[in-house]
């Protein structure tokens, strides 16, 4: 049995309004102060670290759970795209405790290149996971990890 749905102009307008309201609601709680931005950035990187640990642990398994791997790899890809927005001006060391070094803001071209390396490599990890090719996942994960290390070496202070 096929069901045909017809949208009226009014229905389309209601859907558009609801989508706009949802977008506004989702962004209404966006961090506003430098301290909130720093906390949000920390939380984003913590979640990225958890996803990376999940991938690392699963690829060491004799029978990795590809559904869980895919979720983790998707999170890594999303973070690789989103991270460019996690470092607005005014959210560096002048705003409070952070491991982000001033070079993030004083060398924006170099920082953007380091972020691009991550965002270029992350999709390869997801593709390998979706292909269910454990060896390719391992190789891609090493490449993603190298891009993380590249950025950390220049733009992140060591832990206290």
Image (tube, rainbow, N blue to C red):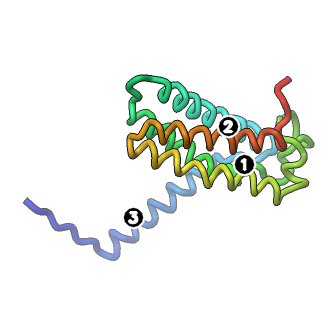
Mark 1 or mark 2: whose residue is earlier in sequence: 2
Q: Nearer the viewer, residue 54 or 59?
A: 59
Q: Residues within 10 Å of mark 3 (few under 14, many from 20)?
A: few
Q: Name which of mark 1 and mark 3 comes first in the sequence.
A: 3
Going 53% across and 51% down the picture, which residue do you hit?
A: 123
From the viewer's side, name the closer residue of 157 and 38.
157
Cα–Cα gap, marks 1 and 3: 30 Å
Left of 132 or right of it: where is 42? right
Q: Nearer the viewer, residue 75 or 32?
A: 75
Q: Which mark is residue 98?
A: none
Q: Position of residue 136 (x, y in %)?
A: 48, 42
Q: Residue at x 70, y 40 (%)?
A: 40
Residue 5, percent from left and from top? 21, 67
The residue depicted at 52 percent of the width and 50 percent of the height is: 124
Residue identifier under label 3? 15
Say which of marks 2 and 3 sits in front.
Answer: 2
Q: How many marks?
A: 3
Q: Is residue 37 above or below residue 97?
A: below
The reply, left or right, for residue 143 in relation to residue 32 is left
**What residue would you read off at disc 1?**
86
Label 1 residue SS: loop
Residue 45's disc number: 2
Does label 2 or label 3 sit earlier along the sequence? 3
Residue found at x 68% / y 52%: 117
């Amino acid at each position: 049995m096929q069901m045909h749905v017809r949208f009226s102009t009014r229905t389309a307008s209601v859907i558009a309004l609801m989508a706009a309201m949802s977008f506004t609601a989702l962004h209404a709680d966006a961090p506003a102060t430098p301290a909130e931005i720093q906390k949000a950035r920390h939380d984003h990187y913590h979640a990225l670290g958890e996803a990376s640990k999940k991938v690392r642990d699963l690829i060491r398994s004799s029978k990795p759970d590809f559904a869980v791997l895919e979720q983790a790899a998707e999170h890594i890809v999303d973070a690789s795209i989103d991270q460019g927005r996690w470092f607005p001006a005014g959210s560096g060391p002048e705003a409070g405790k952070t491991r982000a070094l001033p070079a993030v803001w004083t060398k924006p071209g170099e920082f953007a290149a380091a972020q691009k390396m991550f965002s270029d490599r992350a999709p390869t990890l997801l593709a390998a996971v979706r292909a269910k090719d454990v060896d390719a996942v391992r190789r891609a994960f090493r490449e993603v990890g190298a891009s993380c290390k590249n950025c950390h070496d220049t733009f992140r202070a060591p832990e206290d």
